[in-house]
Image (cartoon, helix red, strand yellow):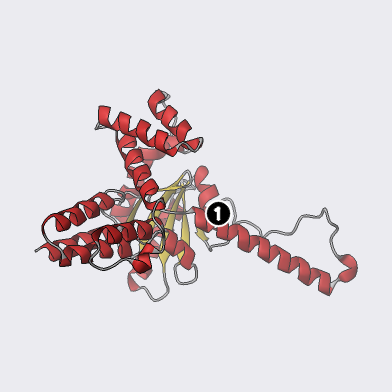
Amino acid sequence: MAMTGAVDLGGIKERAEAQRAQSQRAQATQRAQAQPDQSPGPGTPPPTAPPAAAGASVIDVTEETFEAEVLNRSMQQLVVVDLWAEWCGPCKQLSPVLERLAAESGGRWVLAKVDVDANPRISQAFRVQSIPMVVAIVQGQPVTAFNGVRSEAEIIAWIEEIFAQVGNALPDAPTGAAPEPEQTDPRMLAAEEKLNDGDFDGALAAYRAVAEAEPENVEAVSAARNLEFILRAQAHDPSIVETASPRDLDAQLAAADVLLLSQQPEAAFDRIIDVVRVTNGEERTRARTRLLELFELFDPAEPFVVSARRKLASALY
């Protein structure tokens, strides 16, 4: 399941930083109360929890340690995240295999275990629909994942495929002929500069121009599609979610945009599917077309996309 750009890990990092700061303040307060005559000076840094051993092959990760043990570590090493729970029978079959393979990898990759019940924010960030779920992280980004139990041979093949695809991004990748430097498209660079400068309309026009000239340019097509959606969604009054009439097509499409922008894809899709059920003719066609456009913002293998496609087919036929 390709996940590039589909997972929000920033929220985990921000929460971890906030919780770490809160914990440090609480520790400082406790020390001051217990030993008022030995309180640290204003320039003394707060204590931090010791990191996991550098050579550890299996790490238990929490929301507080996610940034250091997953995001930061993945800049130097492949991190495989095992999302599990105590009550999950299949997890108890898969986890021991992953742990043994990590130990046998000789530090080539590390296994980060996450209890989804104890760390709901991590589960939410990965949009976990079922467990066990295993996600590969490279350079701070998820690159691929799978759900359910897999055999040892399948897991080994999965790991090797990851190294074959992204090995050059890892410091310990096998040496060989240096890859050809990727040429930066000046048109894409100009569009990105407009985006960074806050000229969103100009950036959208630039991305569209590249996409129209080169329909096979996936980066330009995706950038134009995503930016177009964001600008449209931000133009809506968020209250439309509560005030939209069930049979008002334009209002329901706007409400779906707002819901999707707030990372509620299931609710957004259901809004439009409900419209499809109660309309016909041109209105039904418009609703169906918009829903298919929204599907394109996600990996087609995402469980909520697959589910919504089934609901759409049922509503149509």
- On screen, 7 above or below 276? above
Q: Nearer the viewer, residue 316 or 143?
A: 316
Name the residue: 28% across, 68% down.
245
For this view, does 45 lie left or right of residue 191?
right
Quadrant including the C terminus: bottom left
In the displayed orientation, state which residue is furthest to the right: 37
Pointer 1: what residue? Answer: 67
Q: Nearer the viewer, residue 97 or 165?
A: 165
Q: Nearer the viewer, residue 267 or 12?
A: 267
In the displayed orientation, state which residue is furthest to the bottom: 87
Q: Position of residue 195 (x, y in %)?
A: 46, 36
Q: Position of residue 149 (x, y in %)?
A: 30, 63
Q: Amino acid at mark 1?
A: Glu
Q: Is there any visible trace of residue 218 in the rendered image?
A: yes
Helix, strand or loop at disc 1? helix
Q: Is there any visible trace of residue 171 in the rendered image?
A: no
Q: Position of residue 234 (x, y in %)?
A: 41, 51
Q: Position of residue 143 (x, y in %)?
A: 38, 47
- On screen, 285 above or below 86? above
Name the residue: 51% across, 43% down.
75
- On screen, 14 above or below 157? below
For this view, does 68 lie left or right of residue 46?
left
For this view, does 201 lie left or right of residue 147?
right
For label 1, the crowd category at 10 Å Cα-Cα, with few meaning under 14, some 14 to 19 and many 20 or more, is many
Name the residue: 82% across, 53% down.
43
